Amino acid sequence: MQESHESVELMDELFEKFILERRYLRNLAERTLDYYREVYKFFKAVGFDGSKESLQNAVIRFRERGTSSGAINTYIKGMNVFLKWLHTEHNHADLSLQKLKVEQRVFRSLTDTELKTVISYKPKSRSQKRIHQLRRIYHFNA
């Protein structure tokens, strides 16, 4: 128990060093640093103590809570930045996590009838005409 507490304190110290380096040596935006802090806090809240097992258990707990794979992947992405830094700057074991497989959404194609309806759309009100014209200008210039 004592060893685990010490490793958590060491991780906290290293994380603060990571934040300082990112702020002053990499000149990262405060929003980015806040994102790293938030991600680290999420992993700590579910038991991260600096071990690979605790990281894997954290992902399992996120899943058990019903957190989406996409959200978990966002956490993993942020945490991996810290974990890679630990590995390269402090010769810590590479604890990087693989992102979870996410189901890809496939949108159905428009039918010929639906496509003709979209193409033949004629705005009626003045505001609809303005929006329609702005869309045409935007798509023409894009």
Image (spheres, rainbow, N blue to C red):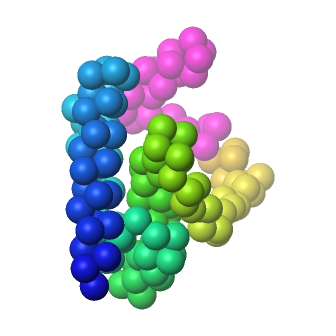
- Residue visible at 28% across and 85% down? 1
Place of residue 65 in the rendered image (x, y in percent of width and height, measured from the top left): 36, 84
Q: Quadrant of the C terminus?
A: top right
Task: Look at the magenta stretch and give its main secondary structure.
Answer: helix
102 or 58: nearer the eye? 58
Can residue 127 be seen from the camera position used here?
Answer: no
71 falls in the magenta region: no
Q: Is residue 120 left or right of residue 40?
A: right
Q: Is residue 26 left or right of residue 109?
A: left
Q: Work out whether 128 lies above or below 15.
A: above
Q: Work out whether 13 lies above or below 71.
A: above
32 or 142: nearer the eye? 32
Q: Work out whether 48 lies above or below 141.
A: below
- Residue visible at 77% across and 52% down? 112
Q: Work out whether 41 lies above or below 130.
A: below
**Residue 42, quarter of picture:** bottom left
> Range of the magenta residues?
118-142
Q: Is residue 58 left or right of residue 10?
A: right
Which residue lies most toward the right here? 112
